[in-house]
Amino acid sequence: MLTGIKAAIIGGDARQLEVIRKLTELDARLYLVGFDQLDHGFTGATKMDLDELPISELDALILPVSGSGPNGEVETIFSNKKIQFTEEFLKKTKKDCTVFSGISNPYLTGCTNGAGRKHIKLFERDDVAIYNAIPTVEGTIMMVIQNTDFTIHQSNIAVLGFGRVGFTVARTFANLGANVSVGARRSEHIARITEMGFRPFYLSNLENEVDAVDVCINTIPAPIITSNVISKIPSHTLIIDLASKPGGTDFRFAEKRGIKAMLAPGLPGIVAPKTAGKIIANVLTQLLMEERNMGKG
């Protein structure tokens, strides 16, 4: 149980509803900022503005998956009011107040470091990333079906990156009958790709590996599908970039060549917000309990 824990959930999307539901069920006391247009009521949760928070009493601040914008703006789909997250605001919290978000950016990292507050980035955890790979792949399959005129079965799929998402993407598309090739940098990944029955290639040779690709799926958050690569891609190829913004694709040049390229970060929250929210809620619950057991609350 989370009896005695006080937390503010600041902004977010439909995934946050599962977080609210889970934490209130465990008897946490929640304050909801940016939810004034939410019709659903939760026992143990109170809607309020940022400046109304009992800020010195809070054990945790739970931000959206995206954290904040580059200037501290916090997105919410449940309000039209602007929410601004600042270092000055954070300094008013207890020293042991923990900030939670999915990812971070230089602004948010600067705020938490400047205020000396602990910041846990949930999407850097292996468990969250692996669980999230499931709805990510389902969303990717949906996008491929919606944006092509051929079957996945027997199509040539190139997956760039063999991390937690790339691994699941490659395996799932292979199970659907696609001819899957996987690009990686590390020799141990090349060995694992080979062992799993995919066709491996080194990313340094990417330009020479895309001349027959039907769908190219990128998972690497760095410039990887460059203009040089795109110039070698067939005109019918669909590019789906799963990396966090701004992705790893030269979208301008893809558009110039008439190649459909789609940036699709945050697919779990789009295609399966309930499941994605439960993943976040379960891990948050575990972390809050661990923090309290270490002497917090």
Image (cartoon, rainbow, N blue to C red):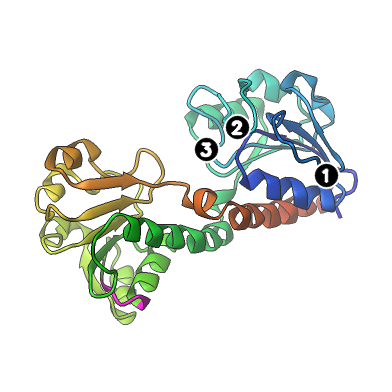
Left or right of 96: which side holds 127? left
- Residue 81 to residue 297: above or below: above
Helix, strand or loop at disc 3? loop
Left or right of 156: which side holds 276? right
Q: Residue 280: image x %, image y %? A: 64, 52
Q: Which of marks 1 and 2 is nearer the N terminus?
A: 2
Helix, strand or loop at disc 1? loop
Residue at screen point 14% across, 37% down = 256
Q: Residue 9: image x %, image y %? A: 71, 36
Please tell me whether mark 2 or mark 3 is closer to you in this view. 2
**CA separation, marks 1 and 2?**
29 Å
Crowd class of label 3 (few under 14; some 14 to 19; many from 20; radius 10 Å)? many
Secondary structure mostly taken by the magenta-highlighted segment of the chain: loop
Crowd class of label 1 (few under 14; some 14 to 19; many from 20; radius 10 Å)? few
Q: Which of marks 3 and 1 is nearer the N terminus?
A: 3
Q: Which mark is residue 104?
A: 3
Quadrant of res 56: top right
- Residue 33 to residue 219: above or below: above
The residue range painted magenta reads 175-179
Circle 1 sits on which residue? 296
Helix, strand or loop at disc 2? loop
Q: In what quadrant of the picture does the C terminus appear?
A: top right
Tell me the kind of residue under disc 1.
Lys
Circle 2 sits on which residue? 76
Q: Earlier in the sequence, mark 2 or mark 3?
A: 2
Callout 2–callout 3 Cβ contact below 8 Å: no
Crowd class of label 2 (few under 14; some 14 to 19; many from 20; radius 10 Å)? many
Q: Is residue 291 in sight in this rendering?
A: no
Quadrant of res 169: bottom left
